[in-house]
Amino acid sequence: MGFLNAGTVVNNSTQAIYNAKPWHLAMVLSKIHMIWVRAVSGRLESRIRYSSELSYNTFPFPTITEMQKKELEKHVYKVLSEREAHTEKTLAQLYDPDKMPDGLRDAHYQLDIAVERCYRTKPFETDEERLEYLFKLYEQMIEEEKSKGTLFETESKPKKKKK
């Protein structure tokens, strides 16, 4: 994931967030988001099939302050900078767990800490704890939507009768 220049055309299976802010990229690059994605997204063979409906729109991300947005921005630019320091490598090579450059690994670690601090000050101990926390937030999101009357609202259309 990264930023694209204005005028870039994305094809049919590519996902894009238009007018995204740097903190949006921090959020979707984070470990906690990837844990959510692995839990709720579809699959194509053994690969994750990211979708805006299942992976992005359902991701429970708290409302954050301007200071938190600036912190996330700082960390996402550090990740991008570390990637650019290794232009001779493909993304697959950069993100190979055995070959990942130490600077990139540390930049992602610091980004993950900053994103998780948007949820709470106490660090998460396991991925299971992260996922449990996210599902509790998701339940709260659903309840809020129900109380607003906006959850799964559809326009009722009369059914056509068969002759």
Image (tube, grey):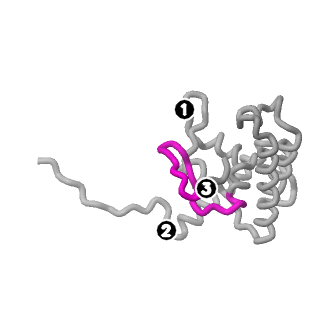
Question: Which amino acid lies under the numbered mark 2 shown in the image of this protein?
Answer: Gly
Q: Crowding at label 3, few (<14), some or many (≥20) Cα neighbours within 10 Å?
A: few
Total count of labels: 3
Given this view, does label 3 or label 2 mark the residue nearer the observer?
3
Q: Is residue 79 magenta?
A: no
Residue that appears at 69% across and 55% down? 25
User: Which residues are the magenta region?
Assistant: 5-24
Q: Residues within 10 Å of mark 2 (few under 14, many from 20)?
A: few
Which residue corresponds to the image point at 60% horizontal and 36% vertical from the top-left?
48
**Identity of the residue drawn at 61% across and 55% down:** 5
Q: Reply above or below: 43 against 147.
A: above
Q: Position of residue 133 (x, y in %)?
A: 74, 52
Q: Position of residue 84 (x, y in %)?
A: 77, 46
Q: Determine which quarter of the picture holds residue 77.
A: bottom right
Specify the amino acid type for callout 3.
Asn
Q: Given the image, on which type of amino acid does mark 1 rest?
A: Leu
Given contact means CB atoms under 8 Å apart, are the residues at marks 2 and 1 in contact? no
Quick one: 21 or 132, which is closer to the camera? 21
Please name which of the two marks, 2 or 1, marks the residue nearer to the observer: 1
Q: Which residue is mark 3?
A: 5
| Prevailing secondary structure class for the magenta stretch in the rendered image | loop
Q: Quadrant location of residue 116?
A: bottom right
Check disc 2 and report its element: helix, strand or loop: loop
Report helix, strand or loop for mark 1: strand
Q: Nearer the viewer, residue 32 or 92?
A: 92
Q: Earlier in the sequence, mark 2 or mark 1?
A: 1
Q: Which residue is mark 2?
A: 149
* Residue 72 sits in quarter: bottom right
The x and y percentages for residue 107 are 84, 48
Name the residue: 55% across, 48% down: 15
Q: Circle 1 is placed at which residue position?
A: 44
Distance from label 2 to label 1 (Cα)?
34 Å
